[in-house]
Amino acid sequence: MLRITQTKNTLLDGATIADQLYTTPKDCEDFFESIEKPTQVVVAPRSTFIRAGVLTTVRGSAYMEYGNTKLMAIVAPPRELVRSSVRRVNMGVINCYVNFAAFATGDLESVPEREKHLGSMLTKALEPLVCRNEFLNFQLDIRVLIMDDDGCLLSTAINCCGVALIECGISTYDLITASTACIYRGCPFVNPSAKIEELFWQHRGGNALLGSSGSTNKDESVQEHGLLINASMDNFEQLAQCQQCGYLKPETYVRLLDYTLEINKSLRQLIRRVLSERVKEQHILDMREREEERLEDERLAIIIERLKQQGLHEFIQSNIKEDPYAKK
Amino acid sequence: MAYVALSEAEKTFILHGVEEDFRCDGRSRRDYRPMDLETGLVSNASGSARLRLANTDILVGVKTEIDVPNPLTPEFGKLEFFVDCSANATPEFEGRGGSDLAQELILSLQNAYESPFAFDYRTLCLIPGQQCWKLYIDILILECGGNLHDAVSLAAKAALYNTKLPRVTARLLDAGITDLIISDNPYDCTRIGIDAVPLLVTVCKIGDYCLVDPTAEEEVCSTVSMVVSVSMRNNEAYLSGTHMTGGGSMHRDTMLNSIQLGLSMGEQLNSLLLKMLKSEEERVGPKRPNTVGFLK
């Protein structure tokens, strides 16, 4: 009795890109069996690529690849509030919009819900970062476009937005870095891939229950499962956002938190380097522009000099090129 | 949350009170305000509860419906939250003004109830893969007096306790089709186990101290709060969803302290709530309480 309502992707002309429309709990079980469980947790970020200032049409933009997760953040300069009745009048307002590209994910049904959820969490994470007291009665729109989803979406989005905000010249209190860690059936994973995250989202942890009560023993031991996303600002060791879902013991929570803090530290080094290189690059560009300006000024100075020497009439006469057609 | 205008002097007064562990209404930092809870006052809903936490007023109704389970989780029933911020609470909720707040509350409740350990979705199953109960938990915010997360989760838990699902028997027809027979005796019903249902505890940071159950005025003074969802299982407290809110940041140690505070408060709240619900239910016969509702 499996009724499947296939959601069509209009951009892909009705085709779907999911290899399998539905993964059953059994599939997830098999998948979990098939992956290698890390014997020891390697607390390091995935291979990362960040570039600030990728677009010329907006002030602040950044592109980031975190393993296979690819996304882009765009920050427009603050503009005056449109909504007349806002709750907090003593602070600037941040609005985050997250969008999935049509080809980013196979599961299209849950996209609007996930977009909304990611947007609200992203707003919460960025609120402590931005000096919101500097633009009263203004709103800051931040847009994120997700091009490829391979897990750690929210944390990657936070990292990318942090870079884009600085590129845009919005004053912030610190650099923000974020990372994800999770635990499933006693196996901790850092930077979980989309497949592992799916174990939590799609089945609402149902597999954890299946696994634990498979032998139908009534006093089912609680199998911890949970996901933790942590955004930190390390200058003053502040946590900007710490979101957890699932079912965790407090001790496990602390363990996951420490993993993420460790990753955040090394990501911070990277983002710092990227930003300083960006500044250097911008400086070289500025120097070149200044050089060009100087040459232009010199050229103009020569013309003015000639103008002074020859007088106006003569100067104009000397500069008129004969029109080859008007000659006839 | 609702906007309350406070001057700098008033804020300082509240801040100093928190530092002295003596808040404006005489509570210490670990005290809750008095609560009134009544269950079963909406006759049209399968279960209902009304909670008044000082000035915060919440009405929760649970409606039931028979639905087809998700093919991915054939043994699980469904749960849906809806929060409505009444414009009676504050004028800002007029039109769509309360939708942001409602969305935030829905998300945190969904997050807290998501794990099958926190809420046993299997009790809502009728025929695996074919029929299940779907519960609509409609939450109405009638007045905002601060600490909405806690109040909403307490009321939702009480309403779930009060929910009576009519007993359903199934008859197998030809070709594997089943026919459901719903009992028409209103007392022939099943209940939902709420032992592990999570409670949300908001731990609010004002100045250097963390406190629970902030009033609307205290919420204005706070820089950041941590919403901790506590689920009790086998007499152990588990975290079933936490997040920070309020636009500030906190140190790791502060956060861990506030989680500890939240967990211990959640534990106490949970045992008190269960005790009160049980004692309310046991008052049958002539001792049975009259439905008071809003006529107090």
Image (spheres, helix red, strand yellow):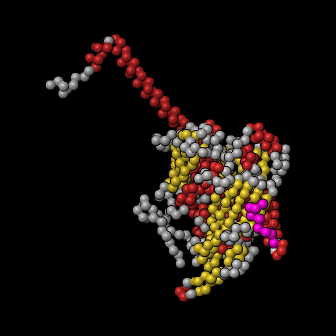
In the rendered view, tell whether residue A193 sits above or below residue B277. above
Q: Is residue A3 left or right of residue B156?
A: left
Foreground pick, A15 / A77: A77
Magenta stretch: includes residue A203: no
Asked if one can make out residue B295 in the rendered structure from this viewpoint, the answer is yes
Instruction: Identify the residue at image location x=22%, y=23%.
Output: A322
Q: Residue at x 83, y 50 (%)?
A: B27
Identify which residue is drawn at 72% across, 79% down.
B187
- Number of labels in the image equals 0
Give how far across and how far down residue A210 sits, in percent.
Answer: 65, 73
Q: Residue furthest left?
A: A328
Question: Where, quadrant-wise, is the C terminus of chain B in this rendering?
Answer: bottom right
Residue furthest bottom as drawn: B174
Task: Say whether residue B230 is left or right of residue A123.
Answer: right
Q: Nearer the viewer, residue B129 or B280?
A: B280
* Residue A169 as seen in the image, left or right of residue A315: right
Residue at the image point whose x is 68% and y is 80% from the top = B167
Position of residue B10 measured from the top left corner of the image (x, y, whole percent)? 77, 40
From what the image shows, is residue B184 above or below residue A247? Answer: below
Secondary structure that dominates the magenta span: loop
Report the magenta residues as a range.
Answer: B288-296
Q: Quadrant of residue A325?
A: top left
- Residue A211: x, y in percent? 66, 72
From this view, report whether residue B5 is shown above or below residue A67: above
Note whether residue A187 is visible: no
Residue A179 falls left or right of residue B273:
left
Q: Is residue B290 magenta?
A: yes
Between residue B47 and residue B230, name the one nearer to us: B47
- Give residue A189's position: percent from left, percent from top: 64, 60
